[in-house]
Amino acid sequence: MAEITTEDVTRFKSEHRVVDLVDALHGDYSVGDAAVEALGELCDPSSVAPLVDAMADDEWSVRYRAHEALERIGTSAVGELMELLHSEHPDRRANAAQALGETGDTTGKGALTELLGDEHSHVRSKAVEALGRMADPQLFELFVEALADDSDDVRSEAAYALGRAGDGRAVEPLIGRLIDPGARIGAARSLGMLGDTRAIRPLLDNIRHEEHGLNRAAIVALGELGASEAVEPLAALLPELDLKDAELIAETLEALGRPEYLADPVITAAKSKDIKDRYADGERWFGERNLVGVDLSGLGLAGAIFRESDLSRAILKGTALGTAKFNEANLTGADLSRATLQMAELRGANLATADLSWTTITTADLEGADLSNANLTSASLFRSNLEGATLTGANVSMADFGGATLPDGTQYRAAIDLGRFGAVGQPARL
């Protein structure tokens, strides 16, 4: 069979060949996405059954695309999905239940409730999941009954559903399920959603649990509950954990009003090592991360990408950062002294109070950057773009601005006094 192309998808759509469009979900990125879009636009109920079957495909990408196509078809698929709930094939019943829940339509509540008595546990599990998405307090008793199901998956979905339903009566049943291997992770997460302080002590008892998923769920829930009594027990865990878990605890402590733990030495040291090791392995993307206070001094990180990262108070002294990308990053108070940033991208970066003394920032893009109160003593900004940048209070003593574009869009000349931009000190003579 010839490989399907995007042109084929266009033809299938014009000819209303929905089965062929479902087959096209197996195509490459562009073909699969085009098929999803076409199925969504056609909104043909006859595509629902094959899409439900595709939800059980061996390929993850096909399963994902089938879900996406059904979401685009939306409520137009409800009637067909309701019929599939009565299919003789259990996988079809399960997938139809899941898809029905994802439509957000509540007309199938009765039919889904009937599936709670299905002989196949995965069908019951998907029915509970779908009903849980409705967040209906009237389903409280059904979810509590499902907590006693003999299937781990059903009990887990019931625990999550009780949290979504938002009924305070669920607190005690959920606390009781913290000892249930099948339901305890869902129970912990739901206790956080319900916001009842009765859950704090039981959750604290599980932050050191041997099951990794449970202790992480308990930590997150304590943050959601605003449990101030969790601060000391959580802080005591930091030295014992790997980077991922330590970051989770630091973020939870921040939610509890203790942001200083984001820069805990244990965490910053682990983050510094993590970046160094990953860079050595060829990775360059470190964007959108919390990197407060990391020590990357003296490293070679040319071309690294730190877009939108929080690098406040980071130590980058003497670091080689040529062509690195810091667009929209927070470098407030960072030490970049004697670093090299040739051709680096720092558009919109916050460099307020940063130390850039003796730093080489030649031909760099600093458009819109905030350099207020930064130390630029003896820095070289030769031919860099500073258009729209803020220099208020920046110390520019002996800095080289030769050929640089200034905040007002003009080019620097020896006669220009940078004091008009609020800077202090005298730049180097050209």
Image: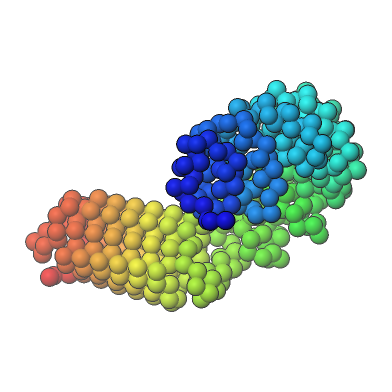
Q: Residue at x 34, y 52 (%)?
A: 348
Q: Residue 195 or 365: which is nearer the viewer?
A: 365
- The spot of residue 359 in percent (x, y) is 31, 71
Q: Name the colouring of the figure.
A: rainbow
Where is residue 341, by image quadrant? bottom left
Q: Residue at x 19, y 56 (%)?
A: 406
Please indicate, yes or no, whether residue 297 appears anywhere in the rendered image: yes
- The spot of residue 302 in percent (x, y) is 39, 72
Question: Would residue 322 be found to the left or right of residue 236 on screen?
Answer: left
Please indicate, yes or no, whether residue 223 appears anywhere in the rendered image: no
Question: Would residue 92 be found to the left or right of residue 268 on screen?
Answer: right
Q: Residue at x 51, y 76 (%)?
A: 280
Q: Residue 156 or 340: which is nearer the viewer?
A: 156
Question: Would residue 343 be found to the left or right of residue 73 on screen?
Answer: left
Where is residue 344, by image quadrant? bottom left
- The spot of residue 185 in percent (x, y) is 77, 48
Q: Residue 35 or 383: which is nearer the viewer?
A: 35
For residue 367, above or below residue 154 = below
Q: Give the number of callouts.
A: 0
For residue 46, above or below residue 215 = above
Farthest residue in the left direction? 415
- The spot of residue 400 in percent (x, y) is 20, 69
Q: Residue at x 18, y 50 (%)?
A: 408
Q: Tell me the quarter of the image containing the N terminus.
A: bottom right
Q: Tell me the quarter of the image containing the C terminus.
A: bottom left
